[in-house]
Amino acid sequence: MYLVKTPYFIQNLFPNFTWKIPTQEKVIYLTFDDGPIPSVTPWVLDQLEKYDAKATFFCVGDNVRKYPDVFKQVKQAGHSVGNHTFNHLNGWGTENIPYFHNVRRCANLVKSELFRPPYGRLLPSQAQFLQRHYRVVMWDVLSGDFDPKISEEQCFMNVINNADNGSIVVFHDSLKAQEKLEYVLPKVLKYFHEEGFRFESLEAGAVKENHALLQTA
């Protein structure tokens, strides 16, 4: 069970997490979790390049270790990268110290202030500690590309029916999601491009977020 659109009351419960970028501009923030994977990530990069789109890749440290050349391709293409733990750990099922060490192990390879917990699951004590060191990025739209129970078209509709200005959308550059991703991503890029949207990385989004905070201060 998962929510395609993160309700505002959940976002408000955790105001220190980044759920979307406050903006009136037609910008979408695509994110890709669990890579880099040689048979998937380079294909994603090719699709993004067709629309001059920038995205953010939340990388599993062990995949970065195994596929450093693919990780290098992501960075050379101008995309943002983020920490997704070294072994894709579920925070709810992991004690704090091993979890923090796993995050740090990934950080030694990825070197980013962005962090997304696998499954979006953190214990309160984990969140409290990690927020001191990272910008914890969640999402407001979950494509469901990992879900074998939904169709490719439903996955596509999950995105276009729920994403709007400043949305952070989750895809996965993983083997599990590959089949749906190859159907959905080109259609999502084409749809929002034709609607006048552009696609930016979360590093660019941070500038907008900080600007919005200054305006309301």
Image (tube, helix red, strand yellow):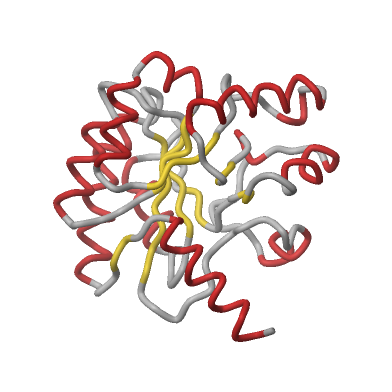
Residue lying at 43% horizontally and 20% vertically, measured from the top left: 63
Residue 38 coordinates in the image, percent (x, y)? 28, 21
Quadrant position of the N terminus in the picture = top right
**Residue 209 visible in rendering:** yes
Quadrant position of the C terminus in the picture = bottom right
- Using the image, determine if residue 152 lies above or below residue 29: above
Query: Depth check: 169 or 57 in front?
Result: 57
Query: Depth check: 197 or 207 in front?
Result: 207
Residue 203 coordinates in the image, percent (x, y)? 44, 56
- Using the image, determine if residue 178 lies above or below residue 138: above
Residue 58 coordinates in the image, percent (x, y)? 47, 38
Residue 70 coordinates in the image, percent (x, y)? 29, 26
Residue farthest left in this picture: 50
Asked which quadrant contains residue 180, the reply is: top left
- Using the image, determine if residue 214 lies above or below residue 78: below
**Residue 154 visible in rendering:** no
Query: Depth check: 136 or 210 in front?
Result: 210
Q: In the image, 124: left or right of 102?
A: right
Residue lying at 56% horizontally and 71% vertically, measured from the top left: 210
Q: In the image, 98: left or right of 117?
A: right
Asked which quadrant contains residue 27, the reply is: bottom left
Residue lying at 55% horizontally and 53% vertically, measured from the top left: 139
Number of on-image labels: 0
Residue lying at 65% horizontally and 85% vertically, measured from the top left: 216
